[in-house]
Image: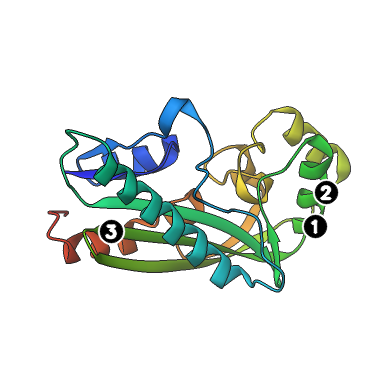
Amino acid sequence: MIYLASRSPRRRELLNQIGVKYEPLLFREGNRADVETDEAVQPGELPDAYVRRVTRQKAEAAWHRVLMRRGLQRKAVLAADTTVALGTQILGKPADRDDAMRMLAMLSGASHRVLTAVALQFESRFEITVSESLVTFARLDEARIAAYVASGEPFDKAGAYAIQGRAGAFVERLEGSYTGVMGLPLYETANLLRLFGVAVP
């Protein structure tokens, strides 16, 4: 049994898929954001460094909650973060409809990287790994982008799309990890869990 420091239903589904038992470690008072995690891109910060930093902060903040919450059993904490990178530019979650339209227009007919970092922390031990995938989108016209944005799917998604949803039809080519693009690379996650003695297939 581990703690999952994420509200993502996709990450929960993926852990269920490989039979890993977990307990969600939710934020206090139902807040979406953790005040101890700064997801703003720092000046000059490259995508690889960004995803590692944010994931480390998530894991450390979650472990701190384990230590501070009375009666909570000490178990390893799993945290993850996914970012979409077009060159050195980081495409986070769209702020609104126009932002989603802008991001998808940038990704149209181009290849981009999807980086998902996964970290485990237990006591003073911390391990992190990063999955990198290359995704190529077909060329999308404005009407197609607008219809996708109108579905509501792009919101709360890095890069304004979900590969496991309607945007799967945009993907011309994928090199790397499908589950990594979804938000939790199962191969890397399983290897990390084994390092901490968690039984996985």
What x and y, as percent, mark residue 196?
Answer: 17, 61
For label 1, the SS is helix
Write the residue at 50% across / 68% down.
Answer: 132
Which quarter of the figure has residue 122?
bottom left
Q: CA distance from mark 3 to mark 1?
A: 36 Å
Looking at marks 3 and 1 on the same chain, the residue that comes earlier in the sequence is marked by: 1
User: Mark 3–mark 1 contact, CB under 8 Å?
Assistant: no
Q: Is residue 178 visible?
A: no
Residue at the extreme top: 29
Q: Amino acid at mark 3?
A: Gln
For label 2, the SS is helix
Q: Amino acid at mark 1?
A: Met
Residue highlighted by disc 2:
102
What x and y, as percent, mark residue 173?
Answer: 60, 62
Which quarter of the figure has residue 4?
top left
What x and y, as percent, mark residue 85?
Answer: 65, 64
- 10 Å neighbourhood of mark 1: few (<14), some, or many (≥20)? some
Judged by depth in the image, the label closer to the viewer, 3 or 1, is: 3
Q: CA distance from mark 2 to mark 1?
A: 6 Å
Write the residue at 12% across / 54% down.
Answer: 199
User: Mark 2–mark 1 contact, CB under 8 Å?
Assistant: yes
- 10 Å neighbourhood of mark 3: few (<14), some, or many (≥20)? many
Q: Is residue 193 visible?
A: yes
User: Mark 2–mark 3 contact, CB under 8 Å?
Assistant: no
Q: CA distance from mark 2 to mark 3?
A: 37 Å
Residue highlighted by disc 3:
121
Q: Amino acid at mark 2?
A: Arg
Write the residue at 52% across / 42% down.
Answer: 164
Residue highlighted by disc 1:
106
Quadrant occupied by the N terminus = top left
